[in-house]
Image: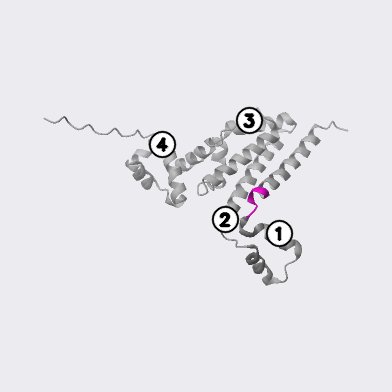
């Protein structure tokens, strides 16, 4: 008599498994492709099973933000304020490039993102306060860098593939009149979205330079 066939053990349903599957679905299908029913089907469970681990779709979306933040793996307090912010911005943009469909959640759910990144945010704020800023200015500086990266990444994604070569861009701009030399140079840089990395670095440098000036002023003795 043949031995009874052993049933394959199903991988347990956990919050982490749900969230990582959700992020993979958004990467593949976009945010509109993520529904609780589709997520459950992807996991091979009933939709109601998900609610033991997450608070509805909003909880899933907040969790997707957490998973993306976990990819930063930063300890900002271990370095100077400028190096810390520069590394944060660089890695944050890398997350945007790795998850272009999910990254807009940082703009749509900013409070949830800050709550999920509280330890990282605390380290960054401490570095800025220790450098000489008051807590309110430190928070404003940190938020400015975060919003710069989000805005740059969303703009970059929106314009991807929409610009042609320099001649095409120049011709389109020339409809309103002759393109001047300086504008022509700017269009050359825009063509095909070339130079995004250089532009990102330039803008980030401007922010950090301005912040360095603010910190120097805060350290200067009165009078």
Residue highlighted by disc 2? 158
Q: Main secondary structure of the magenta part?
A: helix
Rate crowding at label 2 as few (under 14), some (14 to 19) or many (20 or more) other CA atoms within 10 Å. few
Residue span colored magenta = 194-198
Point 42% across, 51% down: residue: 33
- State yes or no: discs 2 and 1 in contact (Cβ < 8 Å): no
Which residue extends farthest right? 223
Question: Where is residue 15 drawn, in percent x and y?
Answer: 42, 35
Question: Where is residue 8 drawn, in percent x and y?
Answer: 27, 34
Residue highlighted by disc 4? 17
Residue highlighted by disc 3? 123
Q: Secondary structure at mark 1?
A: helix
Q: Which mark is residue 186?
A: 1
Counting residues from the start of the chain, the first of labels 1 and 4 encountered is 4
- Please say if 181 is above or below 41: below
Q: Quadrant of the C terminus?
A: top right
Relative to residue 210, is residue 103 drawn left or right?
A: left
Q: Does residue 195 appear in this view? A: yes
Counting residues from the start of the chain, the first of labels 4 and 3 encountered is 4
Question: Where is residue 179 drawn, in percent x and y?
Answer: 72, 67
Rate crowding at label 3 as few (under 14), some (14 to 19) or many (20 or more) other CA atoms within 10 Å. some
Counting residues from the start of the chain, the first of labels 3 and 2 encountered is 3
Spatial CA span between label 2 and label 1: 19 Å
The answer to whether residue 116 is magenta is no
Q: Which mark is residue 13?
A: none
Q: Secondary structure at mark 2?
A: helix
């Amino acid at each position: 008599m043949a031995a009874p066939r052993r049933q394959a053990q199903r991988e347990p349903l956990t919050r982490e498994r749900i969230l990582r599957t959700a992020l993979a679905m958004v990467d593949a299908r976009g945010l509109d492709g993520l529904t609780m029913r589709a997520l459950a089907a992807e996991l091979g469970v009933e939709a109601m099973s998900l609610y033991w681990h997450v608070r509805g779709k909003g909880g899933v979306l907040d969790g997707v933000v957490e998973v993306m933040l976990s990819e930063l793996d930063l300890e900002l307090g271990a370095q100077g304020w400028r190096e810390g912010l520069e590394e944060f911005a660089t890695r944050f943009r890398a997350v945007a490039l790795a998850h272009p469909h999910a990254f807009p959640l940082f703009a749509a759910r900013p409070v949830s993102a800050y709550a999920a990144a509280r330890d990282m945010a605390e380290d960054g704020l401490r570095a800025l306060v220790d450098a000489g800023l008051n807590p309110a200015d430190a928070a404003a500086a940190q938020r400015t860098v975060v919003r710069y990266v989000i805005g740059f990444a969303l703009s970059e994604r929106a314009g991807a593939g929409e610009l042609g070569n320099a001649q095409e861009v120049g011709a389109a701009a020339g409809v309103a009149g002759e393109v001047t030399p300086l504008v022509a140079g700017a269009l050359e840089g825009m063509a095909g979205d070339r130079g995004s990395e250089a532009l990102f670095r330039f803008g980030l440098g401007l922010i950090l330079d301005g912040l360095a000036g603010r910190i120097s002023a805060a350290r200067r003795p009165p009078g």
